[in-house]
């Protein structure tokens, strides 16, 4: 098996909490120097959690990190197209092409609709064909449907079935998936994805056990042990050399960090 750097990829998966800790996130990613970053809750305008409500977080990250990338907007605020939330992929490599996989169709939403209906609001995944580190592969960033309690629901399972079907259509193409799935490893949602992809997050003896931040995530008061809801999945082409969730404050979620080795 080759151990050349050209065939190794570092990927970081992170729900960026609408850019709340943007400067710290940029510093962390510059230090880590990943080949690929998959992100959820990427935002712009009034929907971001940054002090500058005119900021487009996706464009700011691309500029400050010097990376290529693609954003899939899930929704925009009615009458304010600069305000959005979406999923994104960043990479040091070349983005050859991309497509958006819709679970719930795009729509403009009023703030009232979004606050009331975020469980069933517009949702998607972004799938990019990337040439990174000498490997041509598909990179998917996905945000699973949310409920207050991280349990399977018909809507969550329905969206997972769509994602599973999309993965199956990739055939023998190498792929990586990063996502905040809003579900624990024992859930039907995660088990469904594991039928067509390797769960890199839990594959080693030193598996990750939590991805909610132990100090600032909203579940701390009633789930102090934390939840594992963020994952990296891979095709069979990759060996997992390392995976962890460093306790850094770049979001209310911990980043999932993995080093993978590609096998042709």
Image (cartoon, grey):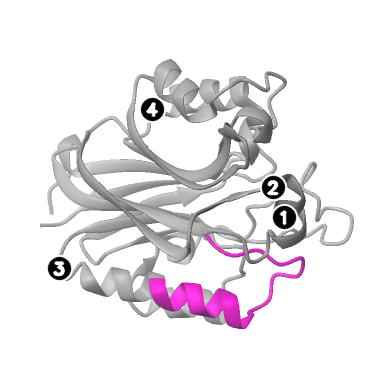
* Disc 1 from disc 4: Cα separation: 38 Å
The disc, 1 or 4, on the residue closer to the chain's N-terminal end is: 4
- The spot of residue 20 in percent (x, y) is 68, 30
Look at the image and say whether residue 244 sits in the magenta stretch. Answer: no
State the SS at label 3.
loop
The residue that label 4 is drawn on is 33
Q: Nearer the viewer, residue 138 or 186?
A: 138
In this rendering, the answer to whether 169 lies above or below 91 is: below
Q: Residue furthest right?
A: 221
63, above or below 200, in the image: above
Q: Is residue 29 above or below residue 52?
A: below
In the picture, which quadrant includes the C terminus?
bottom left
Q: Nearer the viewer, residue 158 or 241?
A: 158
Confirm whether residue 38 shows in the render. Answer: no
Q: Secondary structure at mark 4?
A: loop
In the rendered image, residue 174, in percent from the top left (x then y), is placed at 20, 59
Which residue was labeled with disc 1?
A: 113
* Residues tagged 2 and 1 counted as in contact (Cβ below 8 A): yes
Disc number lying in front (4 or 3):
3
Q: Secondary structure at mark 1?
A: helix
Marks 1/3 in contact by CB < 8 Å: the verdict is no
Span highlighted in magenta in the image: 143-162
Number of the label disc, if any, that sits on residue 110: 2
Tell me which corner region of the image, top left, top right, bottom left or bottom right, holds residue 62: top left
Q: Secondary structure at mark 2?
A: loop
Tell us which disc is closer to us: 1 or 4: 1
Mark 4 and mark 3 lie on one chain; the one further toward the N terminus is 4
Gap between marks 1 and 3 measured at Cα = 41 Å
Q: Which residue position is annotated with label 3?
A: 172
Left or right, 86 with respect to 169, comes to: right
Residue at x 16% of width, y 37% of height = 6
Earlier-in-chain disc, 2 versus 4: 4
């Amino acid at each position: 098996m080759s151990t050349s750097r050209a065939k190794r990829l570092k990927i970081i998966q992170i729900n960026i909490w609408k850019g709340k800790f943007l400067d710290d996130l940029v510093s962390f990613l510059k230090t880590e120097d990943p080949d690929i970053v998959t992100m959820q809750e990427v935002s712009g305008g009034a929907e971001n959690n940054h002090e500058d409500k005119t900021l487009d977080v996706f464009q700011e990250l691309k500029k400050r990190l010097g990376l290529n990338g693609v954003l899939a907007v899930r929704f925009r605020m009615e009458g304010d197209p600069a305000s959005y939330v979406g999923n994104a992929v960043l990479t040091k490599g070349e983005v050859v092409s991309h497509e958006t996989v819709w679970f719930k169709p795009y729509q403009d939403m009023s703030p009232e609709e979004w606050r009331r209906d975020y469980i069933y609001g517009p949702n998607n995944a972004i799938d990019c064909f990337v040439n990174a580190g000498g490997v041509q592969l598909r990179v998917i960033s996905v945000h699973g449907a949310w409920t207050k309690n991280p349990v399977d629901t018909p809507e969550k399972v329905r969206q997972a079935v769509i994602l599973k079907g999309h993965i199956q259509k990739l055939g023998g193409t190498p792929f990586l998936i990063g996502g905040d799935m809003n579900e624990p490893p024992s859930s039907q949602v995660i088990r469904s994805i594991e039928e067509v992809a390797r769960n890199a997050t839990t594959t080693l003896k030193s598996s990750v056990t939590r991805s909610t931040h132990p100090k600032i995530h909203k579940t701390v008061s009633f789930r102090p042990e934390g939840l594992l809801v963020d994952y990296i999945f891979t095709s069979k082409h990759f060996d997992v050399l390392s995976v962890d969730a460093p306790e850094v404050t770049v979001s209310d979620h911990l980043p999932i960090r993995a080093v993978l080795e590609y096998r042709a």
